[in-house]
Image: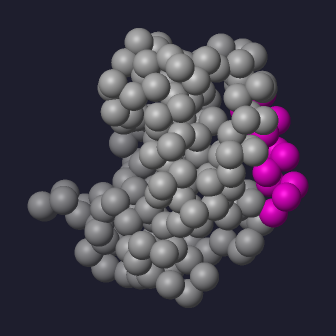
Amino acid sequence: HLSINFGMKQLLTDVNFYLNEGDKVGIIGINGTGKSTFIKCLLGIYKQNEGEITVDGNAVSENPIKQKIVYIGDDLYFFPGYTIRDMAKYYSGIYESFSWEEYERIKGVFGLNEKSKLKRLSKGMKKQVAFHLVLSCMPDVLILDEVLSVGDAAFKAKSEQRVLDMMSDGVTV
């Protein structure tokens, strides 16, 4: 029974949504229908006015639950002076499940130079970096908000394959 409004504008009204482990879901709709707002509620970025959001029976706003969830949105933020490796170190300090082994494996797949400064990368390359980092976190739940809307065909194919591999391993996407 999730509902959220900003001021007088009602964005979501009485939304009910249930997922089981390993479920794969796509949220489709025209721009402005509340897809990203809903996702940000799921992540605890936005606080709903009514309803409850839980993962494994725990409120999503509780930090331990966020250890199991990773998200890539359309609006990326990285520390501009950081390299890809610096951001990986930052992520490894936040996510207990961060795997340097997975990081190295994915680095080989995407061919990213980990010494590259993030401020010098294109939007498409920053999406690749985001994808690389969140997959290295070894999440239980992976939330993607228009991730593959930017990037070349090779990146999209590699990313889609990795998501499919994760789904077969039981990750909820």
The boundaries of the magenta stretch are 158-170
Q: Is residue 28 above or below residue 120?
A: below
Give coordinates of residue 166: x percent, y percent: 79, 51
Q: How is the image coloured?
A: one colour
- Give the tally of numbered discs: 0
- At horizontal 51% and vertical 74% (from top left) the residue drawn is 65
- Which image quadrant is residue 12 in? bottom left
| Magenta-span inclusion, residue 163 | yes
For this view, does 157 lie left or right of residue 122? right
Depth check: 122 or 2 in front?
122
Magenta-drawn stretch, dominant element (helix, strand or loop): helix
Which quadrant: the N terminus? bottom left
Q: Quadrant of the C terminus?
A: bottom right
Q: Quadrant of residue 62?
A: bottom left
Q: Quick one: 66 or 150, which is closer to the camera?
A: 66
Which of the 4 image quarters holds residue 20? bottom right
Q: Is residue 108 visible?
A: yes
Q: Is residue 130 above or below residue 6?
A: above
Q: Position of residue 35 (x, y in %)?
A: 45, 50
Q: Which residue is pictured at 59% across the width and 45% down the height?
A: 134
Q: Position of residue 33 (x, y in %)?
A: 40, 48
What residue is at 37 percent from the left and 18 percent from the top?
119
Looking at the picture, does residue 72 appear above or below residue 64? above
88 sits left or right of 138 in the view:
left
The answer to whether 37 appears left or right of 95 in the picture is left
Q: Does 111 sit above or below residue 89?
A: above
In the image, residue 148 lies in the stretch drawn in magenta: no
Residue 30 is at least partly visible in this image? no
